[in-house]
Amino acid sequence: MNRTNEQLAHDHAHHAPQGPSDIDMHQAVRARTTELAQWVNSALPDGREKSIALTKLDEARMWANAAVALKRPATTDG
């Protein structure tokens, strides 16, 4: 997907929360991903797979928070 310089500038800019609803959503994302990460950490045996699962939860948290911050409309092309 080709992106314009304006889109790239938008993506790389700072996106402060736009009010209490954004802050609440960021907190909700953190709470839920933390709960799952703690369960994974306590329930699964140590090893590469567990480490990757925890890393992917970190990624999921970051992408979810980016979705809140960037407020891009949903698209079908990702």
Image: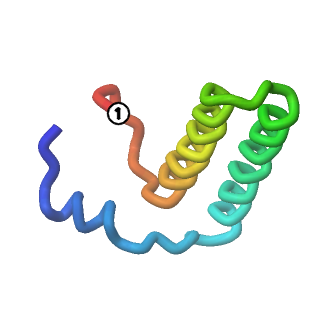
Quickly name the residue at label 1. 75
Total marks placed = 1
At mark 1, the secondary structure is loop
Where is residue 33? Give x, y as percent: 72, 43
Q: Is residue 75 left or right of residue 43?
A: left
Report the residue at 65% width, 39% height from top.
54
**Residue sitting farthest toward the front:** 47
Q: Name the kind of residue labelled 1 in the image.
A: Thr
Is residue 13 shown above or below 28?
Answer: below
Report the residue at 78% width, 32% height from top.
40
Q: Where, by quadrant of the figure, is residue 44 drawn?
A: top right
Q: Is residue 19 left or right of residue 46?
A: left
Report the residue at 86% width, 27% height from top.
43
Label 1 Cα crowd, 10 Å radius (few <14 / some 14-19 / many 20+): few
Image quarter where the C terminus lies is top left
Image quarter where the N terminus lies is top left
Q: Where, by quadrant of the figure, is residue 38 drawn?
A: top right
Q: 54 or 35: which is nearer to us?
A: 54
- Look at the image and name its color scheme: rainbow
Where is residue 30? Give x, y as percent: 72, 53
Is residue 43 shown above or below 30?
Answer: above
Report the residue at 79% width, 25% height from top.
45
Is residue 78 shown above or below 59?
Answer: above
Q: Where, by quadrant of the figure, is residue 73 drawn?
A: top left
Where is residue 21? Give x, y as percent: 68, 61
Where is residue 23? Give x, y as percent: 68, 65
Q: 42 or 27: which is nearer to us?
A: 42
Q: 72 or 61: which is nearer to us?
A: 61
Is residue 14 shown above or below 44?
Answer: below
